[in-house]
Image (cartoon, rainbow, N blue to C red):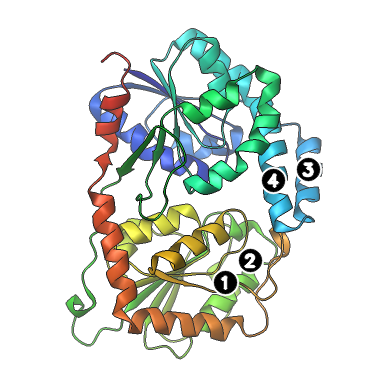
Amino acid sequence: MRVLFSSTRGSGHFGPLIPFIDACTARGDDVLVVAPPGLETLLASRPQPYRIGANPPDDELRRMMDRLRRLPPDEGVSSMTREVFGRLYPDALLPALDEACREWRPDLVLHETYEPASVVAAERHGVPHARVAICAARFARAGDPMLDAALDRYGPGLADRIRSSPYLTRLPASLDPSPYPVTHRYHVPGPHTAPPEGRHHGEEPLVYLTLGSEVGALPTAPDLFRALLDAMDGLPVRALLTVGRGIDPASLGPLPPGVRVERWVPQDDVLGSACAVVCHGGSGTVYGALAAGLPLVCVPLFADQPFNAGLVVEAGAGLAVTPANGSAGTTVTFGGDDVSRIRSAVEQVLKDPAYRTRAEQLADETRSTATCAQLLGLLDPRG
């Protein structure tokens, strides 16, 4: 089978495609990835062939992002979906995707939720397509009307055909019921964590701290990371904070006892030995933690993070601490008593076994779903 993959920029968008790309490679399928220039460094480090499309015009994208940063959070998400994911990036990527479908002739197109240009190209050339979720299904569905308006110019009914295409999600049904008619759930084999009593004698529990791959680029990032470090001060834990490649760990100042800061570590490696996760509520981190049976403390900042934090709390698998000074985009900061609230939440999820029990139940549910390879076999149009 020949499978064309497409993504917008950002590891949170491309990351969910990677298990399917790897599964295709393991099956002996032919793979081609089409993405914007922001992903070229990552794609060049991988063995699969790729093509780089265009970026939106710099001036227009810059003006749009400056405007979005000044909007309230809900308005910012709506405008980002409509203008950036529904208009600017599709217009820029469509020529490369159209050429790939015409010349390379894939049997199947797999795209992440917010990359619709590949569907335009697939429909033009009669190629089946499916979506790989990068967020909760109900959050994606709430944004569909914004995409609809942008996609109408490519042809009537395109948005409806996207919604009726297979929707592939890592989140278990009890956590994230799907409104899409053809929903397939899958899991990525990962770490199986040891229970707390399985730690080495005398070793304090390990708490993993992360704000994802995008926060490090924000002007408020050093203050956000510093607040997480301060929240660990005085807790009887070990902690590992990852800050991304754009932040110098030394710039964060003195570390509390038992705390280590790294630019990056393989997430599965740390989840396999952690007892809890403190994060921004990004879909990738939330999925990884719950798939490993770990309770969470979510400190949501923007985008789908407040929604994901709500899912975690509703499921009983963790707690959420909304920043007192929460705002849109790059202006979000921690303030007031946020540090003490985060510290108290970490103490609570470590002390009360009910949070871990619920997280482990979700992990068991996740492991009962299909593998990526099994879904590829189901989606193979050759039968």
Front one among 306 and 68: 306
Residue type beneath disc 4 = Ser
Residue position for label 2: 221
Horizontal and vertical percent position of residue 346: 43, 80
Which kind of residue does numbered mark 3 sit on? Met
Q: Judging from the image, what secondary structure is the residue with disc 4 in?
A: helix
Q: CA distance from mark 2 to mark 3?
A: 22 Å
Q: Is residue 266 visible?
A: no
Give the mark, 2 or 3, whose residue is nearer the N terminus. Answer: 3
Q: CA distance from mark 3 to mark 1?
A: 27 Å
Instruction: Tell me which label, 3 or 4, sits earlier in the chain.
Output: 3
Q: Within the image, what quadrant is residue 187 found in?
A: top left
Q: CA distance from mark 4 to mark 1?
A: 27 Å
User: Where is mark 3, residue-wise?
Assistant: 64
Which mark is nearer the camera, 3 or 1? 3
Q: First in sequence, mark 4 or 1: give its number.
A: 4
How packed mark 2 is, by other alpha carbons closer than 10 Å (few <14, some 14-19, many 20 or more), is many
Q: Which residue is mark 4?
A: 78
Rounded to the nearest angstrom, the CA distance separating label 3 from label 4 is 13 Å
Label 4 Cα crowd, 10 Å radius (few <14 / some 14-19 / many 20+) = some
Q: Which residue corresponds to the image point at 67% horizontal and 84% vertical from the top-left?
A: 336
> On the rendered structure, is 13 left or right of 176?
right
The residue wearing badge 1 is 225
Q: Residues within 10 Å of mark 1 (few under 14, many from 20)?
A: many
Which sits in the foreground, 306 or 88?
306
66 vs 274, left or right, is: right
